[in-house]
Amino acid sequence: MTQTADPFSFLGHDGPVARLIKGFAWGNTPLGRVETWPQSLKTAAALLIHSPVPMVMLWGEDGVMIYNDAYSVFAGARHPALLGSNVRDGWPEVADFNDHVMKVGLAGGTLAYQDQELTLHRKGHPEQVWMNLDYSPVPDESGRPAGVIAIVVETTDRVLAERRNREEFQRLQSLFVQAPTFMAMVSGSDHRFTLVNPEYRKLIGGRDVMGLPAREALPEVGDQGFFDLLDHVFTSGEAVKRSSQRILLKWRDQGPLEERFLDFVYQPIRDEDGTVAHIFVQGSDVTERVRGENHQRLLINELNHRVKNTLAAVQSIVGQTLRHAATPREAASAITARIMALSGAHDVLTRERWDGADLRALVESAVHPFRNPGPDAFRLDGPEMRVGPYAAISIALALHELGTNAVKYGALSAPGGTVQVRWTVADRDFRLEWIETGGPPVIPSDRRGFGSRLILQVLPDQLQGRADMDHRPTGIAFTLTTSVEAVSDQPA
């Protein structure tokens, strides 16, 4: 008894799909029994069954499907029902697409798709997949197209990964653009700009530096040490961080360099082999903060200076008053009044942030305690002008002493007495006058207490001027003459 030859020996393969092909009832398909297959069909089937790449053959007008092991993995739950089925029925959700493939392929044409998106039902529900598809006709013995062979490589994972990467890059790019800090990326040993965000462009005056080496893009920075830092990061791979670093930058094509202060970090970025390829630059322009801190230090130093001067003034007031007061009660009263006068001047200066004082406001504050005789007891006259803090305190204390004397012995001690305080400026000369009228007869005295010395000696010495006291029959007339620079606390 002779053994029948294996009709599938042409496959030369014994994989899972090959075994299914051998056991499939091909007589129930348009291909018919395998014994009737043309050699072109057998050759094409053997070729694809050995390929590790997903391949499927669509034979005849109906596109009867024969495929390999790799394609069965791609087919998912549709396998093994796809084997021997018509392609339009096997993939009904993409029937129109496959109908086009069959028409082109059987007409002798080829098709190629890169990352073709289709919706397939491989797991019992629709899913989007992406594939590289290549279709070629399979000729029969006469050379006419009898089928179509397809190479199917799914690219879904790569496409989705690239999409995620693009979305992440776009998100990072958006953050990069919208970041409140300045950012840039430089590459290579010449530190060529490859990324620059708007804040960095703003920092460098709007210059377009993309693609330029740092030394060419920012030549004014050459001798300020920043390029040396970049070189160090590139060669050593060590990050560099600086705080409140001073830099001079060109903000305009013409004009001086602008001083700025920066907090920044140079962060190395390595390639796959571990070598530094890029440097990420990130930081903040902290110019206003640094200037504020410097201004605050100046204010603190100035405050310390003023507190010392004020304490010295209080010490002088107390010491001189105690030295010339007849009784402790008189000393206490005089000390309190003089310190209150000093406090009034400080109030005016504080309102002006110790930047000087309006002279009229200062005079009004100084004479306010002596207005008891009536609102018309004082007449103030003079132009608008400002005096420096040092001069303001001296003038306020002098006016206090003049007012105290006027209340005790002068014009303000009698009903109807008045005091005119006026100041004038001629060229660069300043003149302040205190003129009393309507008081009792003036009797000059040889005795000079603290008030007299303050008015006639200390005040002119401090203001680099001259003071005169005239004991007129109508009342005391005091005159201070000095320069505008002296009362402005400026050197002459």
Image (tube, rainbow, N blue to C red):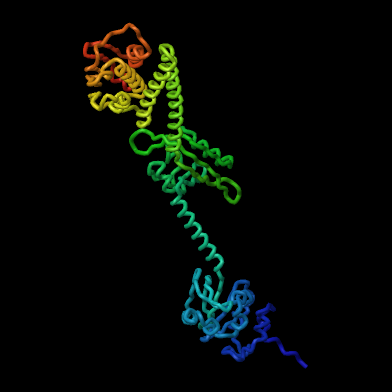
> Dividing the picture into quarters, in which one does residue 403 lie?
top left
208 sits left or right of 424 in the view: right
Report x, y in % for residue 234: 55, 41
Residue at figure coordinates x 43%, y 32% from the top left: 295
Residue at figure coordinates x 41%, y 15% from the top left: 321
Q: How many marks?
A: 0
Q: Nearer the viewer, residue 185 or 131?
A: 185
Residue at figure coordinates x 49%, y 72% from the top left: 117
Q: Nearer the viewer, residue 62 or 312?
A: 312
Instruction: State the residue lying farthest toward the front.
Output: 415
> Dividing the picture into quarters, in which one does residue 350 lie?
top left
Residue at figure coordinates x 63%, y 88% from the top left: 34
Q: Nearer the viewer, residue 421 or 76?
A: 421
Report x, y in % for residue 286: 45, 39
Report x, y in % for residue 164: 52, 62
Which quarter of the rendered picture does the N terminus lie within? Answer: bottom right
471 sits left or right of 177 in the view: left
